[in-house]
């Protein structure tokens, strides 16, 4: 059993992703711990931050392990990192092409979400902006958390696990699409706790979270499936830059 795990897990990839997740967790802290939040903390900020980093690292370590283990069985994972640490030469054109695909997709998704927000959820968006408007640099740092940690938790772990389970039932592309959609719904629901701390969860607020994050999640999931985790990370990061940095300059 131990030997099987050793051959199924790229440990260098594991630790590279784990280290990246810790960087992402640290980067999002200024975005999360606003002054008004810090004032209400029952203990020292450093204690809370330390606990947050340790908790996130343990969660990501588990998710990375399971994601890499099951991903090897169904052809999902982080192909660029796996090839790099596996000694496989990586052409610059390959890296550039995946970066371009990820960045272009992320930009398109970001612009699409902004347009949907303006056309259909303007009141909700304005209500959120009135209560929560972090500085652009905080949004920039938080984008690393979205691009790294959320992709590890949702695509590498959850989508991979669901795909592996659904493929056991029926080996078809439909099983992976189902896993992608379910993961995207979870992605949307995962944003509701923070939203609930800012405004009331009305049907419009819930619909906005599910629709906007669902669209983004499906796009990132498709990239993960077809191009790999790294491309999905770039797309997610780019979308967050559009939403949390560029848009801020126009508010």
Image: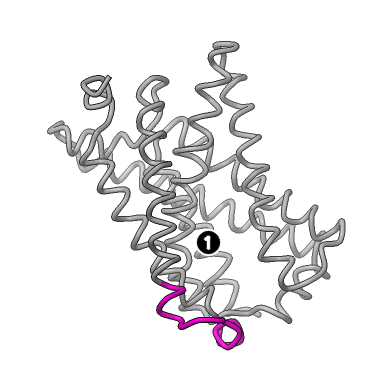
Residue drawn at x 55%, y 21% is 165
Q: Is residue 39 magenta?
A: yes
Which residue occupies the foreground of this view, 147 or 10? Answer: 10
- Categorize mark 1 by other alpha carbons within 10 Å: few (<14), some (14-19), many (20+): many
Across and down, in percent, residue 149 comes to 44, 53
Residue drawn at x 42%, y 62% is 144
Across and down, in percent, residue 193 comes to 68, 61
Across and down, in percent, residue 65 comes to 36, 37
Residue sticking out furthest to the right: 203
Across and down, in percent, residue 174 comes to 62, 19
Q: Which residue is mark 1?
A: 240
As drawn, 65 above or below 165: below
Q: Is residue 195 magenta?
A: no
Residue sticking out furthest to the top: 170
Which residue occupies the foreground of this view, 95 or 42? Answer: 42
Is the C terminus in the top left, top right, bottom left or bottom right quadrant? Answer: bottom right
Which residue occupies the foreground of this view, 96 or 67? Answer: 67
Q: Main secondary structure of the magenta part?
A: helix
> In the figure, is residue 10 to the left or right of 202?
left
Residue drawn at x 71%, y 66% is 195
Quarter of the image for residue 13 reads: top left
> In the figure, is residue 117 to the left or right of 42?
right
Disc 1, SS = helix
Quarter of the image for residue 83 reads: top left
Which contiguous range is marked in magenta?
34-49
Quarter of the image for residue 182 reads: top right
Residue drawn at x 16%, y 32% is 86
> In the figure, is residue 120 to the left or right of 108?
right
């Amino acid at each position: 059993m131990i030997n099987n795990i050793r051959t199924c897990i790229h440990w260098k990839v594991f630790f590279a992703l784990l280290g990246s997740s810790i960087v992402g967790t640290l980067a999002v802290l200024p975005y999360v711990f606003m002054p008004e939040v810090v004032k209400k903390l029952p203990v020292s900020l450093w204690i809370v931050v330390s606990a947050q980093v340790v908790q996130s690292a343990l969660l990501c370590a588990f998710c990375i392990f399971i994601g890499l283990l099951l991903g090897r069985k169904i052809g999902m994972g982080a192909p660029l990192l796996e090839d790099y640490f596996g000694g496989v030469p990586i052409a610059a054109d390959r890296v550039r092409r995946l970066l371009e695909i990820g960045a272009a997709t992320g930009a398109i998704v970001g612009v699409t979400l902004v347009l949907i927000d303006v056309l259909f959820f303007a009141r909700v968006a304005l209500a959120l902006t009135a209560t929560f408007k972090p500085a652009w640099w905080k949004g920039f740092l938080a984008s690393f958390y979205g691009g790294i940690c959320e992709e590890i938790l949702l695509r590498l772990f959850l989508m991979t696990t669901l795909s592996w389970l659904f493929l056991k039932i029926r080996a078809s592309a439909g099983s992976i699409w189902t896993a992608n959609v379910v993961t995207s719904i979870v992605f949307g629901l995962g944003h509701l706790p923070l939203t609930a701390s800012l405004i009331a969860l009305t049907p419009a607020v819930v619909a906005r979270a599910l629709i906007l994050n669902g669209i983004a999640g499906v796009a990132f999931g498709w990239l993960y499936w077809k191009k790999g985790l790294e491309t999905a990370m770039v797309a997610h990061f780019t979308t967050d830059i559009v939403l949390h940095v560029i848009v801020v300059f126009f508010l």
